[in-house]
Amino acid sequence: MSRPRLLLLLWLCTDILLFAGLFCVAYFIRVGFVLSTNFPFLPFLTTALLVAPAWLLVLLTTRTFALTRNQRTVRNAAYIAYAALVGTALFTLAFYFRFKTSFQGVSRLLLLEAFFLTAGGVWLWHLVFDVLRRMILRRSPPSFPTLIVGLTRESKALIAQLNQHLNPLTPVAILDGQGAKEAEVDGVPVLGKLDRLEDVLVHHRITHMIQCSNLEQSLNLLSACRRRGITYMLLPSVLGIVERDEQVESLEGHAVTVVGPEMRGKWFFR
Amino acid sequence: MYAFILAGGFATRLWPLTEKRAKPLLPLAGKPLIDHLLEQLPADLPVTVSINAAFERSFTQWKAQGNHSRAGILVEQTHKDTEKLGALGAVAQWITRDHITEDILLLTGDNYFGFPMAQFLTQYTPGTPLLAAHDIRDLRRAQGFGTVVPLPDGRHVAAFEEKPAQPNSSLVSTGMTILPAAHLPLVVEYAQSKPDNVGGIFEEFLRRSIAVEFRAFTEPWFDIGSFESYLEATRSLVGDHVLLGHKAACTETEAEGSVVLGNHSVIRHSVLRNVILFEHCTVENCVLTDCILDDHCTLKGIDLSRQMLREGTTLERK
């Protein structure tokens, strides 16, 4: 199994265990560190374990585990909190239907604690795991060798940021439509013009390509990516969108890049 | 006199059109660019075309087609852009290898010359290097060429500057020059240190007080090195017409500007503006503006502008 898949599997498993574990912590905080007979632990644990996959499914729909997702953002924390809220609600329902007689033990405070613990604990774990994941995926040979096409100020800034933050997408080569004077950018070699595309894709085992400048060869890049199963990305700056206020949305099934009017707190919904 | 055509470049900026063929073999207004050159050369002038090994096959095919038997092919054993000898290096190698002792008409194979070559040849003063110049009337654009600063007599060159940062003249060298036999040893010597600087040899002539003449022409001239210049050359030669190749067809289509269809290419129910289709392409229900499609491309229901498509590209709206 490849490194990224193994890491993802590990991440999902640890998340499930963490969710159930944090519910258990909430239980013991409320009940005390004893095994109560009035409010038995086993039904509580089995319900938490039963609900954990459903909670994980909710979290998956928020794309929290996506490769491009930075865990250290308020938006990501909000997604995790949202999933924790749904998880707590599911737990409440499941426990009620399974153990109606013991339900009195599930106090509002216990549920509140479970919510805060799962939201906070999972986010903290994600922050730690993100750091580990970046380090592991960047280890030589990198798991996601990335080709940068187009040497522009935007692409230079992007390369610097990817390297600085140890992003799993590791720039390994740069090609430019017109050729470039620089031999390297932030340690990434400039390998020439687009006639070297196929060579570079094969030799560097490219998994991701980021187009950073406007080219007459754009469609050929896209075709090459499709043919080789490479993920293609396009910087919005190619279209002149440089203010980082764009979003990709769906309009009747068509993907569209949207730049809307300024709105306070808009970042939260992106 | 011998004619020597430089066609050994890799044309990397025109990728993917030059993935399998050299720039001089790109079709321009219905025939390869190099054919425009050959047609202008006197019939009795021996011609050598210098190519690289990567494009040997495409030149062999070209030579087998049509009336190209007069052109000798000289293959430079380079397969990558980084290995090439350099244009002047290729000339020097040929001079040395074939013991050339006559004047050389040196032509760059990726240029289109609209002016009569016969007239240029008659204006040659034996023993004096001669170059054809074109006034592009734009000092900024001149930064990308070798510029000619003329003497007041309008015949001799006062200074030659290769890609100057601040050009003193918008008169640029066109890639058609005559190197006299007497100065070939100097060409070989200079090529050892500057193998990629064809224009530099004129700076060297002047530095050594060897007079250099030029002839300025006003007829169209194109240095086809980019997507834009290729389209511009096509627009200039074809005009606002549809040029159909052998067994090509254009039905129920609205065409504007220059539209060129290579052999066996078909367009139906489309809107086209400045489009070049190479051979065996099919375009249906498309809107294309400023596009160049290599052989065997198929587009259906697509709107595109400013794109060069690789051979065999298929795009269909689902």
Image: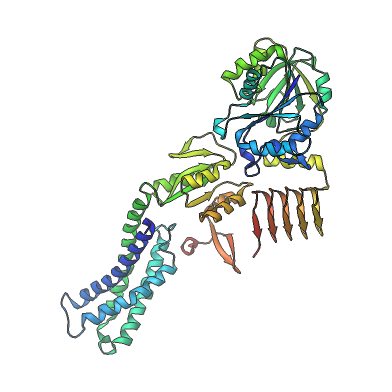
Residue B18, picture quadrant: top right
- Residue A247 versus residue B184: which sits nearer the camera? B184
Is the residue B135 above or below the residue A226 in the image?
above
Is the residue A162 above or below the residue A117 in the image?
above
- Residue A239 versus residue B281: which sits nearer the camera? B281
Is the residue A93 above or below the residue A221 in the image?
below
Residue B216, picture quadrant: top right
| Image quadrant where one finds the N terminus of chain A | bottom left
Is the residue B225 above or below the residue A267 in the image?
above
Name of the residue lying farthest toward the left: A34
Residue at 70% x, 24% y is: B147
Return the x and y of residue A42 as percentages of the image width and height. Answer: 22, 80
Residue at 65% x, 52% y is: B312
Name of the residue lying farthest toward the top: B209
Residue at 77% x, 40% y is: B31
- Residue B78 versus residue B6: which sits nearer the camera? B78
- Residue B8 versus residue B96: which sits nearer the camera? B96
